[in-house]
Amino acid sequence: MFGGLRERLQAARARLAGSIQTAAASDLEKNSSHPPSHPASLEQPVQPASPTTPTLATKVKTFIIDRELIISEKELAGALDELEIMLLESDVALPVTDAVIAHVKKDLIGKHRRIGQSVDSLVVGTLKAALLNVLGKGFDLTEYITNHKHPVKILFTGVNGTGKTTTVAKIGFFLKQKGFTVVIGAGDTYRAGAIEQIEVHAERIGIKIIQHQQGADPSAVLFDAVQYAVSHKIDVVLADTAGRFHTKSNLMSQLDKIRRVMKPDLVIYVDEAVAGNDAVVRAYEFDRTIGADAVVLTKADMDSRGGAAISIAHTIGKPLMFLGTGQAYDDIIPFSPEGMVEELLGDV
Amino acid sequence: MLDSLSSSLKDALKKLAGKTVVDRAAVDELVKDLQRALISADVNVKLVMELSKAIRTRSLDEPPPKVMSVREHVLRIVYQELVRLIWVSTDVKLEPQTILMAGLQGSGKTTTTAKIARYFQKKGLRVGVVCADTFRPGAYDQLATLCAKINVPCFGNPHEKDALAITRQGLAAFKELEVLIVDTQGRHALEVNLIKEIIELNVLTKATHRWLVIDAALGQQASEQARRFHEAIDIDGVIITKMDGTAKGGGALSAVAETKSGIVFIGQGETIEDLERFDPDGFISRLLGMGDLRALAEKAEEAMRVDDVDVNAMMKGKFTLRDMYKQLEALNKMGPLKQIMNMLPLGNMELPEGVYDVTSTKMVRYRIIMDSMTSTELDDPALINSSRMQRIAHGAGATPDEVRELLKYYKLMQRTIKGLRGAGGKFNMQRLMKRFSGMQ
């Protein structure tokens, strides 16, 4: 998972480190030969490292360990451009890419850096900080449920075809295995076959489902599901809803009504890991109109580049809770930002 | 955010406007903005780089034709390059054929299958649908329900686990029909078994067409997925779904480039009629956020006679209830207001939210209320006082509050039109119309 992104980040890491080392090398040349600061040499410090002889390399090493280095914007320009393209190719939305680049820039440029043992660790540290900065914290659902009044009501929202119904089934399965009792409200009363779909899921994983006819008012269905949970002392209510586009104001106000009627403790926004720039637009709109407490990202197994994870988390500042990684009920993994960053940037 | 992008593209174009010779720096800037616009529309990054290189070279090397300004010259090249990329003719022939649907999970295959069945049915062909999705629960129920609505036979069996067996039976059962559409389960290119299955389905059905369904929001992954589907079953057409959201569908463009095929249909809504044939001009305009004038013009032509709405009078600020009445009537034929507004080259202009919230049922109410007004009132709404309001409400079977709401909406529209005129200046409608028609 996220193999593409990992590969690219590793490349960017090497490139950034290379740029800094080159800068240090040209700095050293300047100092050792005592040339007057003629502008020509100053203007091209970003050029790829001139073939350095082993002796020079060792010199550089001792030199940069002992001295402070000032990294200038010019020296990093090439590497940063590459990092930008790499992020864009990994489906990180444009504004978010800008934010990451800005973070790396701010961290690396213009500061006196005491280069300790390795340039690499400096670069990795910066990239990690930049990614963690946009990824935010994770969200522990089991802990949340344990610490809150039962039934915990969870509402799932999102646009069409992102995998809400499947996610509801998977999370139901996950919670059941953790020892919670669960009821599902079949709130997608619009799409043909949706009720049948979730009914089969519920039956397979052995969870009670509350359903009405197709075309019924979803608020009523979900209200009934909550009532059922209260009277049967059930721990968690999972409320499925029909997919809707943030541009349809009537459907969004229907969702608003659902929220007023069932008063969810958590609103979960579901989107797919393969979505491109639009992920940001719709996540923002959903968060603005309905709110979102956490995000589930589905279809992460499609050789996904993971960009959507970074984009959405950064745009609405809400934690990622789960990643959907396949078609089976146990294909769902709790998301941890540190884990992901470690996986992306860890040593090869 | 996206609006600011398209406006920066417009700014770049503006800079070219006064120039008599092609200025390298200005072209570079334009190309950079174009890259950003295309990338944020999810077009494959490599494709964008190739494209912008070609545009840059051509803009600088080709001498602009005498009659064209520099800006028109560059715009024309941008347009031509994009068209070259996406415009492969995809004639949908009205003859007996078998269509195999393929695509990722949740891209909208089943809904699209029903829409296509409806399309052929309306053209007078006898259509049958086979549900070969044996995995997703409820898939057969969904397709069967949709098909029942339009009276198209649907073959399937929710208890059968073998997609090939179902398809074989389905083909036999529908031997007599002219168009057969086989809906398949969602799969992605890394699921080896499922890719194998679709290859077998392709062999079994001897499909005339193999169409790949792509979600408009699909990002950089589109190229890779399309390439693998193409390798497996030789995709010969792409369908973009969910174009009614805010996604620009750049992923579909990458898919088209990868499969060397064309875009067949565009799905933009949840009802069974929401399927359109692909129009490259409109698609490009949307991609760049520049307004879809050609599609609008064509749609408008269909929907209204020339003298229906006097654009000139409206632009001069004279906008009466009578104009609004005609507009509502015309809009009714053209589709939702927001869709129309999206097609206009307004780009960065903010329209008040309330303008969109008028649903079609409300529009009908409004027209009834206006029917109850006198000619003088229609020409000069300021006349309407509370006693006239009472009379109008009475005549239309409405409440005075509804009449008041209508007048409020009228004022909102009036302001919008004025704003449009204000934002006009250089960008006024007719000049834009002219410019775009000159481009083709």
Image: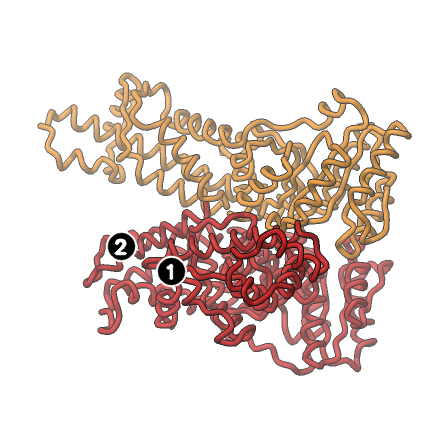
Chain colours: A orange, B red
Question: In the image, B66: left or right of B201?
Answer: left
Q: Residue at x 59, y 65 (%)?
A: B374
For discs 1 and 2, the disc positioned in front in the rendered view: 2
**Does the rendering let one see residue B314?**
yes
Question: In the image, B59: left or right of B278?
Answer: left
Q: Position of residue B265 (x, y in %)?
A: 59, 68
- The amino acid pointed to by label 1 is Leu
Q: Is the residue B440 above or below the residue A321 in the image? A: below
**Does the rendering let one see residue B223?**
no
Residue neighbourhood size for the residue with mark 2, other residues' Cα within 10 Å, grouped as few (<14), some (14–19), many (≥20): some
Name the image quarter holding residue B321.
Answer: bottom right
Q: Is the residue A12 above or below the residue A137 in the image? A: below
Q: How far is disc 1 from disc 2 in space, using C-alphas? A: 21 Å
Q: Is the residue B234 above or below the residue A127 in the image? A: below
Q: Is the residue A215 above or below the residue A128 in the image? A: below
Q: Position of residue A296 (x, y in %)?
A: 65, 38
Q: Position of residue A115 (x, y in %)?
A: 33, 20
The residue lying toward the viewer, choosing from B427 and A9, is B427
The residue lying toward the viewer, choosing from B420 and B92, is B420
Label 2, secondary structure: give it: helix
Q: Name the residue furthest left.
A: A36
User: Label 2 near label 1: C-beta < 8 Å?
Assistant: no
- The amino acid pointed to by label 2 is Lys
Q: Name the residue tied to disc 2.
A: B15
Q: Read off the chain for label 2.
A: B
Q: Residue at x 25, y 68 (%)?
A: B62
Q: Name the residue furthest right.
A: A232
Instruction: Compare marks 1 and 2 and give the one earlier in the sequence.
Output: 2
Q: Name the residue tied to disc 1.
A: B51
Question: In the image, B73: left or right of A164?
Answer: left
Residue neighbourhood size for the residue with mark 1, other residues' Cα within 10 Å, grouped as few (<14), some (14–19), many (≥20): some
Q: Read off the chain for label 1.
A: B
